Image: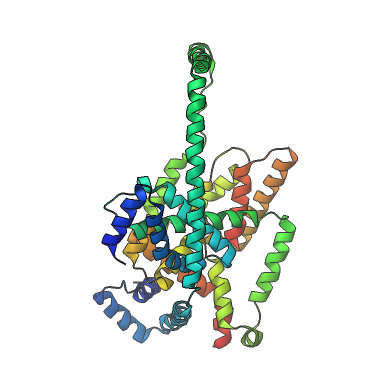
Amino acid sequence: MDEAEDKELVAQAKAGNLESFGRLVERYHGQLYKTIRRFIPNHEDTNDLMQETWMHAWRNLANFREEANFYPWIYRIALNLTINFLRKQRKEGQKESFEDWKKREGDNSSQILLGRNEALELFEFKPKLEEALKTLPLPYRTAFVLVTQEGLNYRQVAEILGCSENTVAWRMYKARQWLQKKLKPYFEGRQ
Amino acid sequence: MTHKKYKKFISLYFDQALSPSDQEKLKEHLVSCSDCQSYLEKMKLIQKEVVSQPGVELSPADIQEARTIIIKRLSQEQVNRHWAKKENFGKLIKRRWQWVMPIFLIIVGSLLYYQFLKKTEIVEEPYGPSLEAIYQFLNERIEGDDDFLVSFNNLIEQAIAEVALIEVDYSFLTDYFYLAIEALQEDEKEGLSRLLFESQQEDSLLGGKNENLSNSFSFFNNYSY
């Protein structure tokens, strides 16, 4: 993407030019959608979050520093809104009784703790990995998706998440540990 | 060096963040360590699968449609804001003398409060560790240090036991909370989960709506099993 052109479009948008802002939407909407969709399993919620992202960006354009690049800024907005959305969703999903919750957890764990032969028959790696990815705690998941799937380096991720590169490295390590733990039955079945 | 250190190296290696000298150390270690070899193989499989997930892309037509909707919403918002501004300005002019009385009352009320009521206020000593101190502690220790989990674990146990008694906001700790939970034994997890649940039930029976308690319980459930 042409950064100089971005700057010009941002300056015009700051002056209230909606057409220029529309050009920015055209440029980055697709990329942002692809990133956010990695966290959100359906189109509707992703679409809502994307709209919210652009509305938020428009309202806060005045706070955007001229010398900064537009894409990391809008990327951060989209990601923060997504993280908030996931947190809220997780909180709402927990309204059930302790016993029900225990029972459900028990059912899940019995699925996970199948014997080796059963595991060989029943487990397919891909869906299990997708499930395991969904269970990753948010800070791990965010770093993991950004590094492995979005191809960003530690420095870029640290900048987006507002933490140090060491923290990103640590979260990547812990994410891999977590996935390995969750996929243990599959790995044991393969041996 | 421990195996854990090499597992960290493997993670860095996949992310192309391992220095050449550490890459050499890792290679040397892998020759003689079947445990780390097996770990590397598992990680390769995970990495390959994760990287190959293509992601969902929008068509150019979808992007155009999204652009149209967003611009339409923004135009509407601009129009609304314009009229709201005009309306507000009109009201402001009409009502300028109506401000005087409330402002006067606020000033007099504040003066009275500081003169008479503030003097009788009982200043309570802060209870337990300061949340800012915990937060700072976590931020400093989070980077790569496993040992802190033990002390954090103790802290969290104490915090959970006390959460029913005092109102504190643990919500900002949530990103770090699971690290402590990872260090707990299964029976400890069960005990703490039950304690939180019962405290929440008790709170709701008493007609309270302790959001912090409910957040802690939800959070604990999310990460503990």
- Residue B144 location (% of width, % of height): 38, 61
Residue B171: percent from left, percent from top: 53, 47
Camera-nearest residue between A125 and B19: A125
The residue sitting at 65% across, 88% down in the picture is A121
Dividing the picture into quarters, in which one does residue A171 lie?
Answer: bottom left
Q: Is residue B186 visible?
A: yes
Query: What residue appears at the point 37 percent right and 65 percent down from the top-left corner?
Result: A169
In the displayed structure, A113 sits above or below B190; it is: below
Residue B90 spot, x, y in % from top left: 50, 27
Q: For the N terminus of chain B, which image quadrant?
A: bottom left
The colour scheme applied to this rendered structure is rainbow
Q: Nearer the viewer, residue B161 or A56?
A: A56
B77 lies above or below A1? above
Q: Quadrant of residue B34?
A: bottom left
Vertical placement of residue A106 versus A17, above or below? below
In the rendered image, which quarter contains the C terminus of chain B?
bottom right
- Apparent side of residue A154 relative to residue A77 in the rendered image (left or right): left
Residue at left 42%, top 52%? A57
A73 versus B163 height, above or below = below
Residue closer to the observer: B215 or B68: B68
Q: How far from the left and from the top, in percent, is residue B217?
A: 62, 51
Q: Is A122 on the left or on the right of B80, as rendered?
A: right
State the residue at coordinates (75%, 41%).
B205
Q: Nearer the viewer, residue B48 or B186?
A: B48
